[in-house]
Image (cartoon, helix red, strand yellow):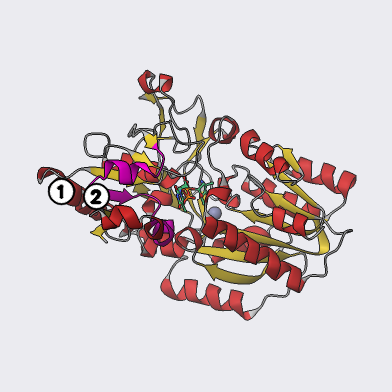
């Protein structure tokens, strides 16, 4: 491995949101490779870049964040393998999101819907179908090209405050902005939110989704921590961040997607409803805004690792074969932190054709197509994409009928 922090990354000393300088570290996942940098056959023999992965709490604004910022060009631009459209559950989730927005808002051919991190057009295509003008913005060229193919107008680039004001001038402001699983990914957190304020109509709404900090901690979803995710949001931290830019989180919904997420509705004028005041009160009541809340987490994650290793090594000792399902970004964190590799796990399967034929970072597991589970019939399969476990297990009737079993690693390792 190549430890080169400094060259492709920097270590933060101030909070990404409030710039406070009292960050309190509560978890260290060790030097970790970049989860979405899948290896090619040639790359296998080259040294891999690894970066520190430490998590901290800001006592000034309650934001949980990692300390290392890896250059976005290294993280997202080159051969980014994540395509949203490979999950039917996510497609359905996004379609429902759009249908609900169409119910609430009077949109037509003179409206504009913008999505930040529009990926392969998985969401905006639903507006296109209804004849509503859209603009997707995404830095990854592969997914952006796929979006254009399905008729979603897409700009390839990073969304910044500057781009927002250029676009507002050239194209006008947005009636709706979608930004799903991207706020945590941007290094200039305040610039991104300022950009939203710039490009949102006075009557517009920004509908933003992100994984929620509470289930991350409660369900020990530590593997969702990786360098792409710079921030881990509570509503308390979000409320402070948006208010700083004259925006108001007026409504919030809890979603089950990605292990538990928030969908916030952000507007230019203040009209906070009970969903927000209730959740803020709950976060205060349980202590999500205090560092003591996180004190036990490191030990919990450590225990999970010991239990998973005991389970897997026990199965290996009995002569069982083990594979994995899902070359997910979170899978790379889990494998790396637990020290699992081809010694225990023979291969990983994934439906995403852009991942097949490559290798997981760090663990170097070869990525095969899902059919390999039935063809090779490993005795056990570690579910790395546990957030889609239900949908995946339903697809694997034959593997199960032939005696295969799944291991789900979180919240505690178990055979299902
Ligand atoms: P999945 C991604 O993380 C990317 P990942 C990103 N870092 C992010 O922020 C989060 O989402 C929110 C495959 N699969 O989507 C597809 C099947 O093979 O949970 C994926 O490779 N068959 C931007 O990568 C992987 O599993 C299936 O039936 O951790 C799931 O990864 C299904 C449903 C999925 O996110
Ligand atoms: Zn802060």
Up the image or down, 389 lies above or below 249; here it is above
Does dot 1 land on a helix, a strand or a loop?
helix
Quadrant in the picture for residue 411: bottom left
Circles 2 and 1, Cβ within 8 Å, touching? The answer is yes
**Going by the image, does 309 lie left or right of 120?**
left
Point out the image quarter for the N terminus.
top left
Q: Which mark is residue 380?
A: 2
Residue 24 seen in render:
no
Q: Please provide percent x and percent y for residue 365.
A: 33, 34
Up the image or down, 288 lies above or below 277; here it is above
Residue that carries the numbered disc 1 in the rendered image: 315
Point out the image quarter for the C terminus.
bottom left
Q: Please provide percent x and percent y for residue 14.
A: 53, 45
What residue sits 49% from the left and 76% below the top?
282
Up the image or down, 79 lies above or below 328; here it is above
What residue sits 51% from the left and 42% below the top?
228
- Residue placed furthest toward the left: 318
Query: Disc 2 versus disc 1: distance between alpha carbons?
Result: 9 Å
**Going by the image, does 90 lie left or right of 175?**
left
**Going by the image, does 294 lie left or right of 284?**
left
Total count of labels: 2
Asked if the stretch drawn in magenta spans residue 328, the answer is: no
Closer to the camera: disc 2 or disc 1?
2
Instruction: Name the residue nearer the viewer: 364 or 191.
Output: 364
Instruction: Name the residue nearer the viewer: 145 or 201.
Output: 145
**Residues drawn in magenta:** 368-392
User: How would you rate the neighbour count of disc 2 (Cα within 10 Å): few for under 14, some for 14-19, many for 20 or more?
Assistant: many
What residue sits 75% from the left and 52% below the top?
114
């Amino acid at each position: 491995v190549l430890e080169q922090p400094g060259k492709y990354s920097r270590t933060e000393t101030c909070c990404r949101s409030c710039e406070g300088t009292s960050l309190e570290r509560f978890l260290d996942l060790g030097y970790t490779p970049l989860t979405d940098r899948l290896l090619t056959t040639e790359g296998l023999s080259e040294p891999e870049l690894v970066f520190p992965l430490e998590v901290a709490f800001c006592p000034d604004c309650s934001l949980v964040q990692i300390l290392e910022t890896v250059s976005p060009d290294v993280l997202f631009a080159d051969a980014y393998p994540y395509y949203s459209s490979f999950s039917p559950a996510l497609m359905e989730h996004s379609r429902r999101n759009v249908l609900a927005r169409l119910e609430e808002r009077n949109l037509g051919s003179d409206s504009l819907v913008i999505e930040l991190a529009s990926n392969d057009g998985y969401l905006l295509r639903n507006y296109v179908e209804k004849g509503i003008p859209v603009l997707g913005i995404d830095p990854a060229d592969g997914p952006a090209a796929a979006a254009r193919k399905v008729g979603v107008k897409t700009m390839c680039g990073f969304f910044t405050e500057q781009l927002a004001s250029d676009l507002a001038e050239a194209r006008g402001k947005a009636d709706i902005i979608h930004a799903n699983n991207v706020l945590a990914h941007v290094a200039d957190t305040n610039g991104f939110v300022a950009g939203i304020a710039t490009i949102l109509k006075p009557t517009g709404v920004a509908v933003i989704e992100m994984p929620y900090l509470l289930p991350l901690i409660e369900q020990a979803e530590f593997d969702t921590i990786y360098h792409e995710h710079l921030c881990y949001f509570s509503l308390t931290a979000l409320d402070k961040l948006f208010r700083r830019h004259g925006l108001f989180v007026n409504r919030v919904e809890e979603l089950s997607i990605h292990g538990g997420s928030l969908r916030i509705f952000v507007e230019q004028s203040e009209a906070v409803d009970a969903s927000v005041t209730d959740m803020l009160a709950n976060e205060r009541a349980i202590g999500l805004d205090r560092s003591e809340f996180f004190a036990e987490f490191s030990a919990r994650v450590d225990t999970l690792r010991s239990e998973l290793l005991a389970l897997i090594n026990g199965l290996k000792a009995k002569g069982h074969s083990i594979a994995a399902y899902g070359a997910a970004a979170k899978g790379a964190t889990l494998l790396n932190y637990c020290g699992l590799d081809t010694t225990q796990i023979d291969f990983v399967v994934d439906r995403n054709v852009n991942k097949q034929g490559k290798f997981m970072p760090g663990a170097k597991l070869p990525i095969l197509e899902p059919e390999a589970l039935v063809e090779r019939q490993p005795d056990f399969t570690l579910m790395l994409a546990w957030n889609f476990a239900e949908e995946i297990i339903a697809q694997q009737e034959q593997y199960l009928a032939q005696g295969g079993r799944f291991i789900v690693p979180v919240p505690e390792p178990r055979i299902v």
